[in-house]
Image (spheres, rainbow, N blue to C red):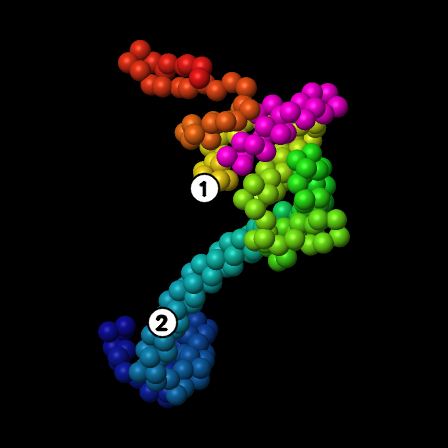
Amino acid sequence: KIKEIPITINSGQLLEASTIDSHAKMKYEKILHIEKTTSGFNQEQFIAKKSELVNNRQRLREIDQEFGAVSNRIENAQKQLEKNKISLAELHKVRKYVIELENIQKNVYSIDGPVAKSLRSWALEIISEKSSEYLEKLNTKIQRISLSQKTRDVNITCYSRSTMLELESLSGGEQVSIALSLRLGMAHLLGSSNLNFMILDEPTTHLDSERRKALVEVLSQLANIRGENASMQFIIISHDAEIFEDSSVENIYKFESAIDGTVVSLL
């Protein structure tokens, strides 16, 4: 009988078949439910929607992967940001130290800073005082030397009692006396003690013959003046042997190169 059931049946035939038994009736009701729920079904639209769903799921997986990568970058960026905050705080401290060091350099070590200006003023005053003392011992008409700073140059002013003297108006010997007195004043300042011994290496360089001999005479005068403890002593190193002619220098030694070494002889 199954073979006698047609493949295609209409609703009337279904209704007739449902009266066979309860099972057939249940099947009939399910068929009616399926027909009702699938009413208006479009196969092409279904396939399109299914394909769209597959694509959307694939895109969702890609978005999840991209989100994971972005989240990882954000996490790394936040960690780096915390490190940068620490570094920035350290740099702020370093900046404060650098500003302080720049202020110290400007005020203490700069040639135009207040400390340097004060030290130069003090040093020029000491050198002026000591140089004037040495000039007094030389019995020249110059009684006082005054050093003053103008911008970055040092001006030398000479006085005879209350009269100011121009350097160009002084004799060669007087100019040498001033130059030597200034050097002795500077040496006294640097040595910070009583000056009684000096070594002069080529002191006659750039001096003419008159000033060369005048230098030796001035040194001889200083050497003959006894101070509080002892007279000043000088060792002069020079290639100009003629400057010692007719001088009161005590001992003159000549150094000559020889095959066996240096030969020293007393003149």
Looking at the picture, tell me which residue is in the foreground, 233 or 241.
241
What's the residue type where badge 2 is placed?
Asn
Label 1: which residue? Answer: 208
Quarter of the rendering containing residue 57: bottom left
What's the residue type where badge 1 is placed?
Asp
| Visible residue check, residue 132 | yes
Residue 72 shown left or right of residue 174 in the figure? left
Residue 227 shown left or right of residue 221 in the figure? right
The circle on residue 46 is none
In the displayed structure, 35 sits above or below 194; it is below
Residue shown at the point (36%, 19%) measured from the top left: 256
Membership of 227 in magenta stretch:
yes
Quarter of the rendering containing residue 180: top right
Residue shown at the point (53%, 31%) measured from the top left: 216
Identify the image quadrant of the N terminus.
Answer: bottom left
Q: Residue furthest top?
A: 260
Label 2: which residue? Answer: 55
**Residue 246 locus on image (x, y percent):** 50, 27
From the image, state whether disc 2 or disc 1 is nearer to you.
1
**Residue 97 locus on image (x, y percent):** 65, 49
Membership of 225 in magenta stretch:
yes
Region in magenta:
213-234
Q: CA distance from mark 2 to mark 1?
A: 106 Å
**Residue 54 locus on image (x, y percent):** 36, 70
Residue 10 shown left or right of residue 93 in the figure? left
Looking at the picture, tell me which residue is in the foreground, 147 or 3.
147
Q: Residue furthest left?
A: 3
**Residue 251 locus on image (x, y percent):** 51, 18
Q: Residue furthest front?
A: 246
Q: Dot 2, how many residues are within 10 Å of its Cα: few (below 14), some (14-19), or many (20+)? A: few
Residue shown at the point (36%, 15%) measured from the top left: 262
Q: Secondary structure at mark 2?
A: helix
